[in-house]
Image (cartoon, helix red, strand yellow):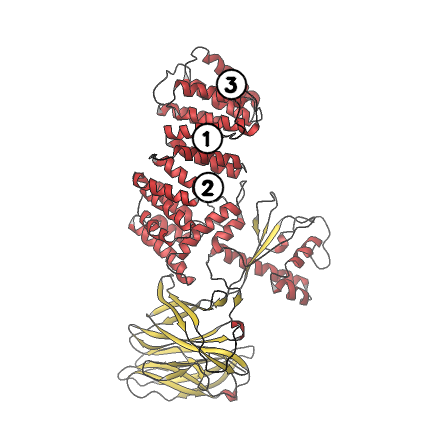
């Protein structure tokens, strides 16, 4: 207690400050240090002793507004520590300050806080809050502070956000009303307009926020970059894509506040390498980086330019409102330590959006918990949360079993190595994954099941915390199958041919027979390993209905030019808004060497409808179903470029690729005749192969030092 008293006494300012027309920087510095010291004191007795000394000193000069100001903030701190009668004393001191120095914003700001305290506590005193508007006096005083000095607008904004963190909606609404009063037209104070826009967007009317930011922009001055960002944020929140232009326009400004704001917005989804690249960029290079940052994400999820950017700001807003972090807590090591105002559910929502399924268990003896499932073509993500220290603050855990790990720590484990609470948790998750349903019941060794569950959850957690996504969501999945092949290879690239098979039954349409066109939306995106978009296709294909091997399909092909190099491909099929699928990303490469060049291998059946029509008029059979019947006539096709003076040698090897691995056949092929690009076909003796998985390899040499090898797998049934 003595140490706290000495700290406050050391920060005291001797009396004798004469009233001045405006507060000096030195006074503001001393006052802020005084307020900081008060916040660190939790002993009301020590504060009372400091109060006695300050009152004794004030008797020598009752007209010193600075001492009244310090006494006011001291009384506020005493009221915060439980002695609510001090709110009235604080208000009296601050009223004296506003009378002696009405141009001092601190006086009006302190008066607003004191009046708010009186309204909240209902403390009796010389002031009575209006029954109709109990917080009106507080709002008016805070508005006067903001109009006197724009810096107090920022303090009002912070008070509002602190009110949300402390679950005080009245505090939030009081601050919003204060800035609405201060920002009434023709207000031009940039700080007031900026603060009002932020509070309107977060707690009031986003449309009103947009109007305020439009008014702020012409007066933003050095904060023009930040004003453009705030304008973009608000347009995105309203679902508008025209926020893209001001977003990138504002990113060119190099002032520290603007740069920090842009970085803060991407910290929760950017990788360490991306954030380091952002930090190195400046001016137009920062804009270039951000265009690539969001463009890569648009390409990976087949989105239009700007859609992922807009969605990101919608998620930020929703997460702050739905998963607020009221109390400080530890952030797991696998998430970057950034300033966040949401719990771990909010972090996952910002990265991946709304889960496709969620389960929670509320029962005696089990702490609050949730599991989320994201339906992905590459495999579901299943992540688990538990609230251990606060029922509203959820944290990620590595396994569902970790949710109940501390509940029965002292109880003996059952023979199945699972406590009673953990068994209840496992049963509650049966709807979210086959692992908790089918595999758990079918696995006789429970230890093996527990290891499998932890491995799956750990992998999901790693993926969920290191990636982000914005997938299309369909209420009915369309399990499409595809086959790829590139032909026409030269120095400019090649043409990619895509054969696709879509099962007819999930379309929920009437079958009218074979050979009927059915319109289907097809989207394709090809992007480099760095994520830059290289190829885009969004078209309505018209595949034909076919009945193949007793099943009904839509069968079609399409083609698109692609540049040389390695790329990743994403393709989606869609029938209306509710039926569709987004297929896993597949790698593809077109690598012309300038010497001996060879395309990828394509295996297909000539009697089936998937025939790629090449630019020279030839047709190549493809097999999107992924298997070939032993009774069918299969064909291998590829292109090879024959350089002058070459003497080609071709070797074809068929290898069993499943648990019965081994070479099945090894033969030489007849080399192509002529020079330049040649299409090579070879009939495969499928009827000699037993059912199983096979890999076919073709190696070509030209006698000039050139060598090319390609392979592909196919299944025989």
Position of residue 618 relative to residue 14, above or below, is: below
> Between residues 477 and 29, which one lies in front from this camera angle?
477
Q: List the single residue furthest toward the top.
A: 60
> Can you say whether 209 is above or below 510 in the image?
above
- N-terminal label among 3 and 1: 3
- Residue linked to disc 2: 204
Specify few, some or many for label 3: CA neighbours under 10 Å numbering under 14, 14-19, or 20 or more.
Answer: some
- Name the quarter where the N terminus is drawn: top right
For the residues labelled 1 and 2, say whether their Cβ atoms are less than 8 Å apart. Answer: no
Relative to 294, is 350 on the left or the right? right
Q: Where is residue 517 shown, x and y percent of the image?
A: 44, 78
Q: Quadrant of the C terminus?
A: bottom right
Alpha carbons under labels 3 and 1: distance apart? 30 Å
Cα–Cα span, label 1 and label 2: 15 Å
Which residue is identified by label 1?
Answer: 139
In the picture as drawn, the residue positioned furthest to the front comes out as 132
Indicate the position of residue 577 as horizontal and vertical percent values. Answer: 47, 65
Crowdedness of circle 1 by 10 Å Cα count: few (<14), some, many (20+)? many
Per the image, label 1 sits on a secondary structure element best described as helix
* Earlier sequence position, callout 1 versus callout 2: 1
| Residue at the spot of label 3 | 50
Residue 572, percent from left and from top: 45, 68
Element type where label 3 sits in the image: helix
Count the labels in the image: 3
């Amino acid at each position: 207690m003595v140490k706290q008293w000495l700290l406050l006494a050391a920060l005291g300012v001797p009396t004798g400050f004469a009233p001045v027309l405006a507060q000096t920087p030195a006074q503001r510095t001393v006052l802020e240090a005084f307020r900081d010291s008060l916040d660190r004191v939790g002993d009301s007795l020590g504060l009372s002793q400091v109060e006695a000394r300050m009152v004794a000193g004030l008797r020598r000069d009752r007209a010193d507004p600075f001492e009244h100001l310090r006494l006011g903030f001291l009384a506020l701190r005493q009221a915060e520590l439980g002695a609510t009668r001090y709110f009235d004393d604080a208000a009296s001191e601050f009223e004296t300050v506003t009378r002696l120095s009405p141009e001092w914003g601190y006086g009006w700001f302190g008066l607003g806080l004191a009046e708010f305290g009186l309204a909240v506590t209902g403390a009796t005193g010389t002031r009575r809050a209006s029954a109709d508007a109990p917080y009106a006096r507080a709002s008016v005083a805070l508005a006067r502070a903001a109009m006197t000095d724009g810096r107090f607008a920022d303090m009002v904004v912070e008070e509002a956000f602190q009110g949300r963190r402390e679950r005080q909606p009245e505090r939030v609404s009081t601050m919003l009303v204060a800035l609405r009063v201060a920002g009434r037209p023709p207000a031009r104070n940039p700080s007031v307009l900026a603060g009002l826009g932020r509070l309107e967007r977060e707690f009031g009317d986003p449309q009103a926020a947009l109007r305020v930011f439009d008014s702020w922009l012409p007066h933003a001055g050095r904060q023009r970059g930040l004003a453009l960002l705030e304008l973009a944020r608000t347009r995105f929140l309203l679902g508008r894509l025209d926020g893209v232009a001001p977003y990138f326009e504002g990113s060119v400004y190099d002032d520290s506040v603007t740069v920090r704001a842009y970085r803060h917005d991407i910290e929760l989804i950017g990788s360490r390498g991306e954030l380091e690249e952002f930090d190195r960029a400046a001016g137009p290079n920062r804009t270039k980086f951000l265009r690539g940052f969001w463009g890569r994400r648009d390409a990976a999820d087949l989105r239009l330019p700007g859609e992922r950017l807009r969605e990101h700001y919608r998620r930020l807003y929703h997460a702050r409102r739905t998963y607020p972090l009221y109390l400080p807590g530890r952030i797991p090591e696998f998430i970057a330590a950034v300033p966040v105002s949401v719990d771990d559910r909010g972090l996952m929502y910002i990265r991946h959006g709304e889960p496709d399924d969620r389960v929670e268990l509320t029962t005696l003896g089990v702490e609050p918990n949730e599991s989320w499932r994201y339906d992905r073509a590459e495999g579901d993500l299943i992540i688990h949360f538990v609230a251990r220290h606060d029922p509203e603050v959820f944290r990620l855990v590595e396994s569902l079993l970790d949710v109940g790990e501390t509940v029965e720590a002292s109880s003996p484990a059952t023979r199945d190595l699972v406590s009673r609470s953990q068994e209840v948790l496992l049963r509650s998750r049966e709807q979210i994954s086959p692992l908790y349903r089918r595999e758990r019941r079918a696995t006789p060794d429970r230890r093996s099941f527990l290891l499998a569950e932890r491995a799956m959850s750990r992998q999901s957690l790693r993926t969920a915390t290191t990636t982000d996504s914005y997938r299309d969501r369909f209420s009915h999945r369309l399990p499409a199958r595809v086959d790829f092949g590139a032909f026409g290879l030269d120095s400019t690239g090649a043409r990619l041919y895509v054969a696709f098979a879509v099962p007819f039954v999930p379309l929920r349409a009437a079958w009218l027979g074979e050979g009927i066109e059915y319109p289907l939306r097809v989207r394709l995106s090809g992007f480099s390993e760095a994520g830059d978009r290289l190829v885009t296709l969004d078209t309505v294909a018209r595949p034909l209905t076919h009945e193949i091997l007793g099943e009904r399909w839509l069968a079609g092909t399409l083609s698109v030019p692609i540049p040389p190099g390695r790329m990743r491909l994403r393709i989606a099929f869609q029938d209306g808004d509710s039926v569709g699928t987004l297929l896993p990303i597949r790698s593809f490469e077109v690598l012309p060497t300038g010497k001996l060049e060879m395309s990828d291998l394509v295996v297909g059946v000539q009697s089936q409808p998937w025939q790629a029509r090449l630019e020279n008029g030839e047709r190549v059979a493809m097999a999107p179903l992924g298997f070939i019947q032993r009774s069918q006539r299969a064909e291998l096709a590829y292109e090879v470029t024959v350089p002058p003076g070459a003497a080609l040698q071709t070797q074809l090897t068929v290898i069993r690729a499943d648990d019965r691995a081994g070479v099945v056949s090894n033969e030489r092929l007849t080399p192509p005749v002529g020079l330049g690009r040649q299409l090579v076909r070879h009939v495969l003796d499928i009827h000699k192969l037993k059912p199983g998985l096979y890999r076919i390899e073709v190696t070509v040499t030209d006698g000039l030092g050139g060598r090319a090898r390609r392979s592909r797998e196919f299944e025989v049934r």
